[in-house]
Amino acid sequence: MADLSAIFNPFAIFGVALLVGALLYAWGRALAPPPTFGKYKREMYTGGEPPKKQIVRPGYEFFHIALFFTVFHVAALVLVTAPGGVAAWLALIYLGLLGIAVVALLGGR
């Protein structure tokens, strides 16, 4: 039986995949029609109306939502990946401290 380890080498497979991707890209580029840029091609779409000039001040209220999202998802990750034994107690202590932090964040609003 022939030695197939050179064919199934990850670098060889990556090279073949890269070559196939480049060939597909070149074939798709040859099939595509040439690009045409109209007068309004690069303007933003507003339903045919010119956009209104407005001064928009950024709001930072979203920061609290993003912070809670991060805190709760990290807590869920810790809870799910915590092994049993002493590490489970450490995860529960961490979640308790996290609860105190959430109460402190809610009290600050």
Image (tube, rainbow, N blue to C red):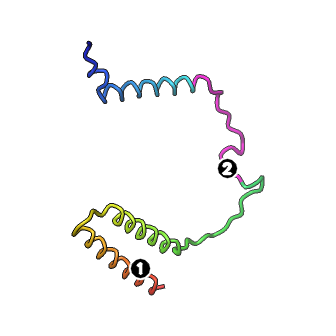
Look at label 1 and name its amino acid.
Val
Q: Residue furthest right?
A: 48
Left or right of 72 in this view: 2 = left
107 to the left or right of 14:
right
Question: Residue at (65%, 46%) from the top-left corner?
Answer: 42
Q: Which residue is disc 1 drawn over?
A: 102
Instruction: Tell me: residue 7, above or below residue 104.
Output: above
Find residue 102 and report its horizontal and vertical position in percent: 41, 79
Please name whichever residue, 102 or 28, is drawn nearer the observer in this view of the structure. Answer: 102
Give SS at disc 1. helix
Q: Establish if 100 lies above or below 16.
A: below
Q: Residue at x 68, y 43 (%)?
A: 41
Mark 2: few/some/many CA within 10 Å (<14, 14-19, 20+): few
Mark closest to the chain's N terminus, 1 or 2: 2
Q: Report crowding for label 1: few under 14, some 14 to 19, many 20 or more residues within 10 A (C-alpha).
A: some
Residue 11 occupies quadrant:
top left
Which dot marks residue 43? 2
Indicate the quadrant containing the N terminus: top left, top right, bottom left or bottom right: top left
Task: Please tell me which residue is depicted at 52% across the width and 24% down the height of the picture.
Answer: 26
From the image, give the main secondary structure of the stretch colored magenta.
Answer: loop
Nearer to us of marks 1 and 2 is 1
Please state the extent of the stretch shown in magenta in the rendering. 29-45
Three-letter residue code for mark 2: Glu
